Amino acid sequence: MTQATTSLEATAAGPTTSRWWRIGGLVLGWVGFVLIWGLTSRFILDEFVLPGPAKVGAAMWDIVVQGEFIDDFAASISKTFIGFALGALMAVPIGYSMGRRRYWKAFFHDGVVGAGSIPGITYAVLALVIFGTGYLGPVLAVAMISLPYIALSVAEGVEGVDINLINMSQAFKRAPSDIIRQVMVPSIMPFVFAGVRLAFAIAWKVEALTEVFGSSNGVGFQIRYAFQAFSITNVIAWTLLFILFMLLIERGLAKIEAHVFRWRIWEATA
Amino acid sequence: MTAATVSGTQDTSANRKPKSKLRRTLTSDTSARVTFYVAVIVGWQLVAWQVERMPAPWETLQFIYTELTGGTHGGVVTGEFWEHFLATLQRFSIGLAVGFVLGVILGLAIGSIRFVRSLLNDVLLVFLALPAVIWAFLTVMWFGLGWQAPVYTVILASIPFVAVNVAQGVRSVSPELHLMSDAFQVPRSRRLRNLMLPAITGYLFTGLRFAVIIGWNAVLLAEWFGASNGVGWRSRFWYDAARYRGFLGWVIVFIVFIFVLDGFVLRPLQRHAFRWRERGDDESDLSLDDVVTTGI
């Protein structure tokens, strides 16, 4: 995976010699960012137009202290995960057949490739039209958007399975379950993990977007509410809280991935 | 799963009996793709039968026709298309041009200056994660209804994605080549032309593709929440009027637009720019790299 970049991982300096440089830069970067933000809001724009970091920070603190955010976060996260699981469940057979059969690959090709370029607003509003403002809308929007990414990564993985290994296993009369467990799964898993990570980064955004368009709870609903109350402070506060939380989950996923595949040494050097 | 399906991995025709011509035609790639589209339309029709609010394909097509030709939708409402489409296209292209240029400049700085890179590493991560709808909300609150909110939303949403890809392009030039250029005292201008540019071009196109897809979603969102014309506004107009065939018709329009732009212009450009890259023989045309665009 070299080409499509949605993170800076590849550009982050690796060797330990630059570790302090990195941490220093990180701290400096955030301090500088907050400083620029604060100065812009104080002197260039207006506190009303762009609330300063202190004001937004206070609003975030309020949201956390009041404790109501737990309900909204729980709602958003549960919708994300249920939708994600549903999407993955449908994606695995599709991806598997795409990796194995030329016909199914051609069949799903346009749908899977095109899904990445459909504007997210489509998923959000279509889910709303079909399922209304209940719980189901966001869940199915998430399922629809994560399906193609996971299916594609499964297909890539299945295609990459070494046929010679399977043939050899059969020659030595291994049971099919053994072949699946010890040949297929290990070579497919890295692709699946990569797909899951990418799909998740998109899934939670679509979930929030669907809630913005129509929902009665969740973080997206709160952001919409703040927008309609014309509270720039609260829009920024809710957004930052949600983004920081989701980035933490994404980082956790990456950590799990690194742990599971620590035996793949060549990945680290590639 | 049985052993038979596991061994079926190789689809070579060596030990298979020859297929009839009809069968070959039916299982060809083209017919598979056609079948897919037919299945999508059939599925849509099935949903339309089940869900009252979902318009049928035929109704939607009729609506698009009326909207395009300026016919009447019943009552006093008449079809309007080009006014909205061109307004959106204009905002989209202005935002895209500005956002792309700014993104490239930022990306060059991040890629080539180590200090800037370590400064912006984490901050950019947050901006990458920021959904476009937040920019739409903020710009609408800042500028009110009008052309500014959509244009600024496109600019703000696309910059980080362009920057990250350009930065990666700069970083993809191996340090050894830089060292060698130093040793042989290659002038700066030649180094830029022969070393940097070829390396960056592919990443530039990738960045452009990201910007287009993200920008298109962004412009629609901003128009949905804060404009008085344009594609996003028009689809919201029908949505609010509970005329879902109108809403769906516009959804089809903006999906077809981005499909055509991506499939026939951007993806081929990206492939062309990366053609020097070695691709294995068995590498199929399915790669996550080419598809992931995160147009949210």
Image: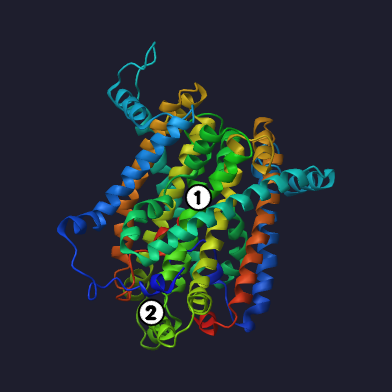
- Where residue B191 sits, quadrant-wise, is bottom left
Q: Residue furthest top?
A: B75
Q: Residue at x 20, y 59 (%)?
A: B24
Q: Residue at x 57, y 56 (%)?
A: A201
In the structure shown, which secondary structural element does the residue marked by tag 1 occupy?
A: helix
Looking at this view, is A159 or B3 the one in front? B3
On the image, the x and y values in percent for residue A51 come to: 70, 42
Q: Amino acid at mark 1?
A: Ile
Per the model, the C-alpha gap separating discs 2 and 1 is: 31 Å
On the image, the x and y values in percent for residue A117 come to: 41, 50
For disc 1, the marked residue is A145
Tell me which label, 2 or 1, sits earlier in the chain. 1
Q: Amino acid at mark 2?
A: Ile
Query: Vertical placement of B90 versus B82: above or below?
Result: below
Which chain is disc 1 placed on? A
On the image, the x and y values in percent for residue A111 come to: 38, 51
Looking at this view, is A23 or A14 the one in front? A14
Which numbered marker is on residue A163?
Answer: 2
Q: Residue at x 41, y 73 (%)?
A: B6
Mark 2 and mark 1 residues within 8 Å of each other at the beta carbon? no
Which chain is disc 2 placed on? A
Q: Is residue A52 visible?
A: no
Say few, some or many: other residues with alpha carbon within 10 Å of mark 2 (under 14 / 14 to 19 / 20 or more).
some
Q: Is residue A8 left or right of residue A172?
A: right
Q: Is residue B81 left or right of residue B163?
A: left
Q: Residue at x 19, y 63 (%)?
A: B19
Say few, some or many: other residues with alpha carbon within 10 Å of mark 1 (under 14 / 14 to 19 / 20 or more).
many
